[in-house]
Amino acid sequence: MKQITRILGALAVIVITFLIIDQAFGLMADKMIATQSTGKPAYDISRKGTEKLVVVGSSRASHHYDTKYFTDSLDLPSYNLGMDGRGLTYYEAVLMSYLDNNRPEIIVLDLLPSDFDGNLNERVSALYPYMKGNRHIERISREVSPSNSLTLKSNLYAYNAALLPELKWKLQKYNPDNLGFIPLEPKKMNGMVESELDISANIDSVSLMSFNNIVKTARERNIKLVVVVSPIFNKLKGMDNFNRIVNQYDNVYFINDASFQFKEPSAMYNDNAHLNKDGARVFSKKFISQLDSINSL
Amino acid sequence: MSFTSLSFLLFFVIILIINYCLPQRYRWMFLLGASYYFYLNWQPIYAILLSISIVITYLAGRLLYRDTGRTQSRKIICATSIILLIAPLFLFKYYNFITSTIESFLNILRVSIEIPKMTMLLPLGISFYTFSAIGYIIDCYRNKYPPEKNIFVLALFISFFAQISSGPIPRGDQLIPQLVKPENLIYDNFIKGLHKLIWGFFMKLCVADRIGIYVDTVYNNMENHNGGSLLLASVLYTIQIYCDFAGYSLMAIGVARMLGIRLLENFRRPYFATSVKDFWSRWHISLSTWFRDYVYIPLGGNRVSKRRRSANLMTTFLVSGLWHGASWNFLTWGGIHGATQIGEKHWNDSKEKKRKWWKIITVFFIVSFAWVFFRLVTNHEIGMFWNKLFTQFGFPFADMTLLYIFIAIMILFIFDYTAEFKSAFFSKVSNNFWASNILCGVVLAMIALFGVFGSNSFIYFAF
C-alpha cells in the first residue's frame, strides 16, 4: 500500500508540474502571441476588408497572385490568404474564418493534385493557437485527428507547431501592405531542367472533405469559386483524379495554367514550382483576363 | 503500433492495469497474449514466421538438453537450428543483395541475366528476434543455463512486445526468470521506468525527429545544397540516429520496467567515448556484446596472434555492418569501424596519450564520418556528398528549425554530461522524489511544446 501511495504521489507531482507549466505558458502565450500576433495567419483569419477577390492556397498562391497589382492597377480589390507549406485543411480553416468577416465575390483556390493526398493535413496546426472562439479551426482540428479534441486542451501542445512560425514572423515582420501577396525576389536560375512530375496522388478523405466544404460554402454564399493550377516549370503527369474531382461541381470554374508559356522562363521562376515577382506579375495579368471571361458568364 | 503513437499509450495503460490486477504467476501468460496482439497489429502474416522461429528455438533447446554429453549430435542440432533460424532472415534481408551482386558481376562479364527478386516487406524485428533465438540456442549448447521447459515462456522471451521491434536483444538467463516471476508493483520500478519512458520520448520527439526535419531537407535534395549544409546535416545525423535509437531503447526499457521486468542497458552516452572501442562498449550494447560473445570470441577473440586478432575484429564488424543492412554502404560502415579499432590498437601500443576532450571530439568525428555511409545508400549520393564537401563548401542552409535543434541538443548535452561526469549529483537528483518527478513534469511540458508528432517510425525498424 505504501508503494502504491508513493507511486500515486509521484504521478501527481508530475501531472501538477505539467499543468502549472501548461497554464502559465498558456496565459503568457495568449497575451504575447495569439492576441498580438504579427504573423500572416493571425492577420488573415481576423482580417476585415472590402475586397471582391480572395486567393487561397499554399506557397504557390502566396507568391503567384499579385493582389496588390489587382487592387491598385486593375481596380479589383483583392486579398491573398496563401501560406507556405499548407494543405487543404488549412485553406478551409483560413478561408472559413475569413468569410466570417468578409463578403468577396470570387474565391481563387490555387491547387496542385498533391493537395488531395492528405500529407499536409496536419499543417492546419499553425492555426491552433487561434482556436479559442473560432469554430472552424476547432472543427477542422477534430477532423484532422479525433485525439485533438483531448490533446488541444494543452496550451503547450496547441502552440507546438505555431511557436516557430510565430517567432519567424516576429523577426521577419509581415507586411500587410502587399495584401497578402509575398513577392519572391528574382534570382539567377541557371541550368533549370524541366522534368516530369507524377502528381497522381491518392485521394485523402479529410482533404476531400475540406475541398467539398469550400465548394459548398461558395455555393451557399453565391460566391464564384475558381480552381487554378498556376504555372509550374515541371511537366505535370497524372492529373486524371484531380480533373475528375474538380469537374464534378457545376459551380467550380477550372483554369489549368500549369503549362503557361513564358517568353523567358528562367527569368520568371525562382525554382521549379514558384514564380518570382516578375513571373507573378506576368501571370497575374494573364490570369485577370481569364477571370474576366468567367465573370462575364 | 509505435511507442510514440497514442494507440500504443492506450494499449500500454490497459496492459499495466490488467498486469498488476493479475496474480504474479499468471502475468507472463497475459504478457504473451499482449505481445502477440502487439505483433499482429503490425504485420499479422509474419506472426506465423515468428511462431516458427519460436518452435525451432524450443525444439533445439530441448534436443540439446536431451543429448547432453553427445558432442557430435549437439553440434549438428545447434548448426541446423541456427541455419533454419537464419534462413528467413537471409531470404528477406540478403537475398536481393546477393542476387543483384551476382547480376552486376555477370554484367561485367557481359552475361545478362535477371534473377527473380524478393518483393515482400521485411518482417518487423526479424533481425532482433532471430539474434535473441540464436543467442539462446548457443547458450544452451554451451550449457550456460538449462533450456526453458515451457514453450510459451520461451515464446514470450522471443516476442516480448517491449523489445521485439528494435531490441535490446535479450539473453535467456537474464530475461526468462524475470518473465516467469516479474517483480511486484514498487515505486522504484514503476516511476523509474516512467522517467526512462519520458526521457526516451524527449530524445525521440524533441531531438531525433526535429533534427530529422533538417537532415531530410538537405539529404533528400542534395543537388540544391552546398558542402557546408551537407557537413552540418551529417553531424546532426550523428545525433539524430543516437537519439532515435537510444530513445527507442529507453522507451522499451522503461515500458518493461514499469511492468516489473528489467531489460539490458543498450546505450551509455556513446558520444562521450574516448576511443572507437569505447564507443562500441556504449553503443547498442546488447548487439555489440552479442557479436563479442557469439562471433568475436568463437573466432579466437584476443587469445590469438596480433594479425589474427585484427582479422577477427574486422570480420566481426563486417558482419555487424551486414546485420544492419544488405548493401555495400553498410559493409563500408562496418569496415570503417573495424579498421579504426585495429588502428587504435596500434595507436595504444605506441602509448600515445591525448587529452580526454580531444579524444572525445576525435571519436565523435570518426563516428560521424562512418554514419555518412549509413545514411547515404547509393554510390551516386555518396559521391555527390564528398564532391560537394570539397568543391562547393559554403555557409550551411539555416532556418528556424536549427534554433529548436540547438535548444534540444543543449538540454540533451547537459543531461548526458551530468550523468557521465557528475554521476554523484545525477544519482542524487534521480533518487530524490521531488526533484526527479518535478523534472519529469518539466520534460513532459517540453515534449508537448517542442516535440515533433505524427511520425511514428524509428530508424532501426528498418533493420
Image: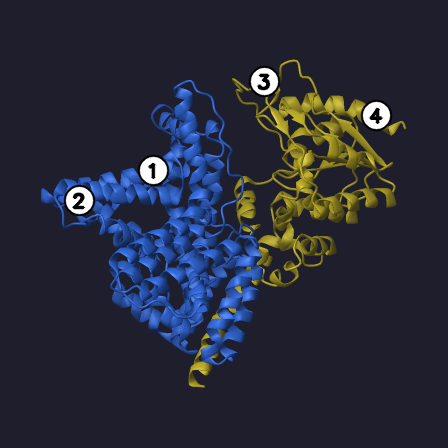
Chain colours: A yellow, B blue
Type of the residue with mark 1? Leu
Q: In this rendering, would A21 be left or right of A180?
A: left
Residue at the (56%, 19%) spot, across then down: A193
- Mark 2, residue position: B309
Q: Chain of mark 2?
A: B
- Mark 1, residue position: B331
Query: Contact, CB < 8 Å: mark 2 with mark 1?
Result: no
Q: In this rendering, would B170 be left or right of A33?
A: left
Residue B392 visible to an observer of this rendering: yes
Work out whether residue A197 or residue A263 is closer to the camera in this orientation and state it. A197
Query: Contact, CB < 8 Å: mark 2 with mark 3?
Result: no
Q: Quadrant of the N terminus of chain A?
A: bottom left
Residue A266 disc label:
3
Work out whether residue B218 or residue B287 is closer to the camera in this orientation and state it. B287
Query: Contact, CB < 8 Å: mark 4 with mark 1?
Result: no
Type of the residue with mark 2? Arg
Type of the residue with mark 4? Asp
- Mark 4, residue position: A292
Dot 1 alpha-carbon crowd within 10 angstroms: few under 14, some 14 to 19, many 20 or more: many
Residue at the (42%, 55%) spot, across then down: B129
Q: Element type at marker 1? A: helix
The span from disc 2 to disc 1 (Cα, nearest Å) is: 19 Å
Q: Are marks 2 and 4 on the same chain?
A: no
